Structures are given as structure tokens and as C-alpha cells.
Image: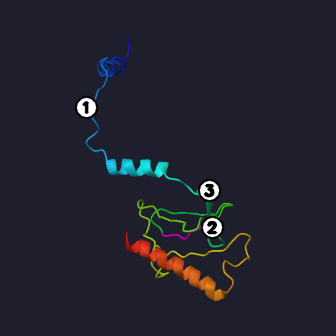
Amino acid sequence: MRDPGLWLLVLCVLSGCSGEEDVRSGPPTSARWDIVEALRADGEARRHPSDGGGRVRIDGGSGNPQLTATVSRPGTWSFVFETGPEGISEGGWIFFQAPPFWGWSAPQTIDQSYPGFTEIFMHPVPRGIPIMETLDAVTEEINAARDYLDRCLAEI
């Protein structure tokens, strides 16, 4: 005797095949055309040769060499970004966004003791070459980057 469950499954699958083409009348009502157009415009935008030339890696450092993450427990990770050989174009920028899902804390630059504390450290490659000629100029550049990040976060 054959398995009646198998025959039922085959019957259910075949009953969904009407042989007619699925023709819809227009775009889905849930379509977000503003997003579609923004994605199209982004895909057609002119890019500087430096775009996409960098890389990012997670550096566990001495405090967390295995890069261990435990669900529902705060952790500390260093994301190290290296520009490509073209550097960053004048007026260009690097944007870091913590995932807006999975419970990540929003980035903040004010208090190390609060979740989401984010700090920026810049240096050229190879290491040891200062990004500016004087310590004051380096501090000014880092503070300008911090101010820019704070303005970006205020807009969110």
C-alpha cells in the first residue's frame, strides 16, 4: 500500500499549478519608490578612485584576543579601517554606523562609562608618521573629526 500522506502532498502541490501566468496590475502597493530612486541614483553616482579601496578589520587587542562576543553582554571591539592607496578624496569621509538592530548601543563620544562610547584614532601608514606636523595640529584635527561625528549623531 502506498503512503496516503505522499499522495496528499502531491495533490496539494499540483492544485497550486493553474497553468495560467501570474499577471499583476501595476507595482505592489507597499513599494517604497523613494528608496528605489535613491538606490538607483546611488548606483549611477560618479565615484572617486579611492572609493572602495580601503578595508576594515576587527582587532581584539590584548584584552580580548579571541574576539569573544556573548549575547546580552557588553563588549569592546576595535574596528581598524585602512584606506587604500588613493587615500580619502578631499572633502570625502569615512562613515561608521553601528547596526541599528540586534541591540547595539548608539555611538556616543561623551562618556567612556556609558554604552556606545566611540573614539577615533587616526594615523597614516606606515605607523609613526604623524598626521600633522605638531601635537596641537593633531589635536585640532581629531577634535574637528569628533565635532563632525557629534553633529552627525545629533541629526539622527
Q: Position of residue 41 (x, y in %)?
A: 43, 50
Question: Which label belongs to residue 40?
Answer: none
Q: Which residues are magenta?
A: 74-80
Badge 2 or badge 1: first in the primary sequence? 1
Q: Are marks 3 and 1 in contact (CB under 8 Å)?
A: no
Location of the N terminus (image quadrant) = top left
Q: Helix, strand or loop at disc 3?
A: loop
Question: Which label belongs to residue 49?
Answer: 3
Left or right: 12 with respect to 92?
A: left
Q: Disc 2 and disc 3: Cα gap in Å?
A: 31 Å
Q: Is residue 71 above or below residue 121?
A: above
Q: Disc 3 and disc 1: Cα gap in Å?
A: 43 Å
Residue in the picture at 41% in, 62% down = 100
Q: Position of residue 75 (x, y in %)?
A: 52, 69
Of discs 2 and 3, which sits in the foreground? Answer: 3
Q: Nearer the viewer, residue 109 or 84?
A: 84
Instruction: Give the amino acid at mark 3.
Output: Pro
Left or right: 121 with respect to 153?
A: right
Q: Position of residue 96 (x, y in %)?
A: 51, 65
Q: Disc 2 and disc 1: Cα gap in Å?
A: 53 Å
Q: Position of residue 60 (x, y in %)?
A: 63, 67
Question: Which label belongs to residue 25?
Answer: 1
Instruction: Give the amino acid at mark 2.
Output: Gly
Q: Helix, strand or loop at disc 2?
A: loop
Q: Helix, strand or loop at disc 1?
A: loop
Left or right: 103 with respect to 81?
A: left
Residue in the picture at 48% in, 48% down = 44
Residue in the picture at 65% in, 87% down = 135
Q: Would you name the residue on which mark 2 appears? A: 60
